[in-house]
Image (cartoon, rainbow, N blue to C red):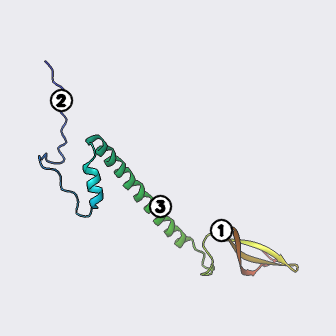
Amino acid sequence: MRFAPLLVNTDRPMSYEPPTPPADLPTDVIDTLNDYSPELLRDVAHYAEDLAEHRERQARLAEAEEEDEIDERPDDLPDDVPTKATITIKEINDNRYYYWQWREGDRVKSKYKSPVNPDE
């Protein structure tokens, strides 16, 4: 007669007592989890781990984006102009001028930068 090997999780000691929930876990979450089957609890655990990794990744990306915005801000960009602004040229009365231009919702905003140097 052959017996299949028994796989045991050795990361945590086995106990006949129910586990103690973390102190900061809300009571309603504890009550809900206590009603779940072992299979559903494992599904919740996998989902919670995946969700935690996703949120950590989103936070890292947002932080990296903030750092990029700070690092890439041109020296001559005024404080009231966002870093996403681009420079455009407008012609007014046969004179050419540089303007910072960016979008805010459905509107395009502009702010004067300087005259265009004809030698450029």
| Residue in the foreground of this view, choosing between 77 and 50 | 50
Q: Amino acid at mark 1?
A: Gly
Q: Position of residue 38 (x, y in %)?
A: 26, 42
Of residues 17 and 68, which is closer to you in this image?
A: 17
Left or right of 32, for residue 107: right
Which quadrant would residue 7 be assigned to in this image?
top left
Position of the C terminus, as image quadrant, is bottom right
For discs 3 and 2, the disc positioned in front in the rendered view:
2
Q: Residue at x 52, y 67 (%)?
A: 68
Name the residue type under label 3. Answer: Leu
Q: Which mark is residue 5?
A: 2
Q: Residue at x 26, y 60 (%)?
A: 27
Check the image and report above or below for 76 versus 21: below
Disc 3 secondary structure class: helix
Q: Residue furthest top?
A: 1
Residue 68 tag number: none
Residue where numbered disc 3 is placed: 61
State if disc 2 and disc 3 touch (CB < 8 Å): no
Q: What element does badge 1 sit on?
A: loop
- Disc 1 to disc 3, how far (Cα)? 23 Å
Name the residue type under label 2: Pro
Asked whether, in this view, residue 80 is left or right of residue 64, the answer is right
Q: Position of residue 48 (x, y in %)?
A: 35, 52
Can you say whether 20 is above or below 63 in the image? above
- Judge depth for marks 2 and 1 and give the one in front: 1
Asked which quadrant contains residue 109, the reply is bottom right
The residue under label 1 is 105
Q: Earlier in the sequence, mark 2 or mark 1?
A: 2
SS state under label 2: loop
